[in-house]
Amino acid sequence: MKKMIKPVLSHEQSLDALVKTIRIPPRPSLLADVQKELSASDPDPRRLAKIIADDVAMSASLLKLTNSSFFGLRLKAKSVEHAVDLLGLDQCGLLMTGIIARQTVGTSGAALVKFWNFSTHRAQALTYLARHIPVCSRDAAHTFGLFCDIGVPLLLERFSDYPNTLSMANAAFDKSFTAVEDLRHTTNHASIGSLMARTWGLPEEVSTAILLHHEYAVLGDAATDESIRGLIALALLAEYAIHLYDGEEISAEWEKGGADTCHFLGISQDEAADRIDELHDMFNHSH
């Protein structure tokens, strides 16, 4: 009787099998409707307002954010239509993307509360930095700030020991963050996050930047689109600012990529420190 030879799974096949076990949420229909309206040849604020107003929870979240101290608007939005008028179509679309992501991925539990607080801070900081250091569009900066680490909650859900992996990766000075994840789980939050961004129809520069955002050597690679490198550089500066704001003096990521970031942005360490001070002022005023 012939002995059955068990086929050996290639690395790609085993990776595919693993990815199938990680729940990547499909793009919500509400987001698809919002994106469709915004990408129309003649987007209509009334139609966008109607799409949002049909979802009570989303409407409430949009009004709360529009009237928050972060925007500091002179007028308070009284309705979704009013909010769209005050914010403008693009800004409204960005906020809706963030609100929908939160609702889809979830916000319960201390780890997720901390995750979304950090992501919101990063999105605000990136938008500010992109205004003053124009290496990428402000819209892309805001979206990237929110979705940069979106793979983290998906891996928290899949692997019970993933919090330990995060601690190890955050403390690793001698290897990349994603290398620590790959070693323990055969995948990493950058790959999974990039996959989700593509599934959700986010801009290609955002999904590519998510994939590469811990590969700081890419900052010196002229073959990589400048806006992608801009997103990665500004995100690292923003994250370092948040770590310092939270009282964490040492950042392994800044140690690994800070010099490359300053070089790419054409700023000195002192100028980076000035930008960080500006972000801290902004954080103080948006609380």
Image (tube, helix red, strand yellow):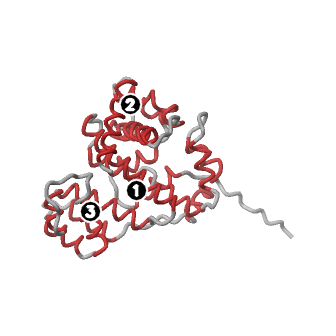
Residue 52, image x, y percentages: 24, 70
Mark 1 Cα-neighbour bin, 10 Å: few <14, some 14–19, many ≥20: many
Whichever of labels 1 and 3 marks the residue nearer the N terminus, that label is 3
Q: 145 left or right of 43?
A: right
| Quadrant of res 126 | top left
| Quadrant of res 209 | top left
Residue at position x 34%, y 49% in the image: 123
Mark 3 Cα-neighbour bin, 10 Å: few <14, some 14–19, many ≥20: some
Real-space Cα distance between discs 1 and 2?
Answer: 24 Å
Q: Nearer the viewer, residue 125 or 223?
A: 125
Whichever of labels 3 and 2 marks the residue nearer the N terminus, that label is 3
On residue 35, which mark appears? 3
Residue at position x 44%, y 59% in the image: 196
What kind of residue is marked 3?
Answer: Gln
Residue 133, image x, y percentages: 28, 34
Real-space Cα distance between discs 1 and 3?
Answer: 13 Å
Q: Nearer the viewer, residue 37 or 108?
A: 108
Q: Is 148 above or below relative to 273?
A: below
What kind of residue is marked 2?
Answer: Ala
Quarter of the rendering occupied by the N terminus? bottom right
Instruction: Mark 1 vs mark 2: give the one in front.
Output: 1
Residue at position x 52%, y 32% in the image: 256
Q: Is 182 above or below relative to 32?
A: above
Residue under circle 2? Answer: 222
| Quadrant of res 51 | bottom left
Residue under circle 1? Answer: 197
User: Circle 1 sits in a helix, a strand or a loop, which is it?
Assistant: helix
Q: Nearer the viewer, residue 17 or 73?
A: 73
What kind of residue is marked 1?
Answer: Ala
